[in-house]
Image (tube, helix red, strand yellow):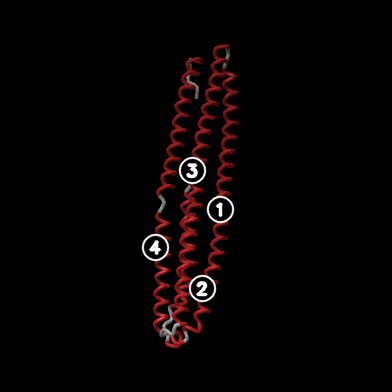
Amino acid sequence: MNSKKITFAALAAFTAINLVLPISVFSQTNPSATKGFCTTISTISSKIDQRIADSTAKLETKRTEISNNIVKRQSEKTARRAEKRTKQAQSRETYYAKLDEKATNETQKQAVATFKSAVENAMNVQWSAIDAAIQVFDSEANNALVQRKSSYDAVISAYRSSISAATEKAESACSSGTEQKTIRATFQQEMKAARDKFQTDRQAIDKVKGSLQTQRATLKAAVNKAMQDFRAAMEKARTELKAAFQQQIQ
């Protein structure tokens, strides 16, 4: 369950690192770079587009990896639960056999049969409740991941649009004969604004964790209740069996 939290954090870090690096292209302030800015704007734009395209491709690869890992972990957890339950069932059968040996009359034999039925029913109810709670949590967690992906895609799209708009504005200014120093300064400011907005929007997405935390608490509460109900049913079954045998059954 905590793996979902780790997944979100890893994806956020990956997105931030890979999508804001292109802005470093504009950190140079030497005079020659300023003088020839209009002649290199198309090259700069192409480099930016390529870097973002490469970063987006890496992001998709990372998303696929994360999605596959989530499916794998969920499958492994399901397999571990099934294995544990099989072992518990085998242990119960051994215990039932011992009870059958102790039952010496019809009353005791009937009490053992009732006990077996009560235990198996309580176990099945517990498993069903836990499985249902896990299914709900996994569904909500997967939905949260999909929603976060959608939010990130929107932020990335807006980021790319801002960069494209800044580039087109600079190219237009170059065509109109505006001083290159002014064009470059404006371009740098707008690129920085695009980067800062991307970071702010990304951080806003990262802060939206309440829904999943609520589902995690709901899952924990459902599991605890299922276990409590099972213990109560088991205590009742033991009490009734003990009465039939008139002795402590461990």
In the rendered structure, the answer to whether residue 189 lies left or right of residue 92 reads left
Asked whether the beta carbons under mark 3 and mark 4 sit within 8 Å of each other, the answer is no
Q: Mark 4 points at which residue?
A: 200
Mark 1 vs mark 4, CA separation in Å: 25 Å
User: Residue 247: which disc?
Assistant: none
Residue 118 lies, in percent from the top left, at: 52, 23
User: Residue 48: which disc?
Assistant: 2
Point out the tag, 2 or 1, that comes first from the N-terminus. 2
Graded by Cα atoms within 10 Å as few (under 14), some (14 to 19) or many (20 or more), the crowding at tag 3 reads: many
Residue 219 lies, in percent from the top left, at: 45, 40
Instruction: Name which residue type carries label 4.
Output: Thr
- Tell me which residue sits at (40%, 60%) in the image: 203
Task: Judge by depth and name the residue closer to the eye, 150 or 166.
Answer: 166
Point out the tag, 3 or 4, that comes first from the N-terminus. 3
Task: Judge by depth and name the residue closer to the eye, 120 or 250.
Answer: 120
Q: Mark 1 points at which residue?
A: 67
Instruction: Name which residue type carries label 1.
Output: Ser
Task: Judge by depth and name the residue closer to the eye, 210 or 177.
Answer: 177
User: Which tag is nearer the camera, tag 3 or tag 4?
Assistant: 4
Q: Mark 3 points at which residue?
A: 137
- Tell me which residue sits at (49%, 43%) in the image: 137
Mark 2 vs mark 1, CA separation in Å: 28 Å
User: Which tag is nearer the camera, tag 2 or tag 1?
Assistant: 2
- Tell me which residue sits at (42%, 85%) in the image: 30
Point out the tag, 2 or 3, that comes first from the N-terminus. 2
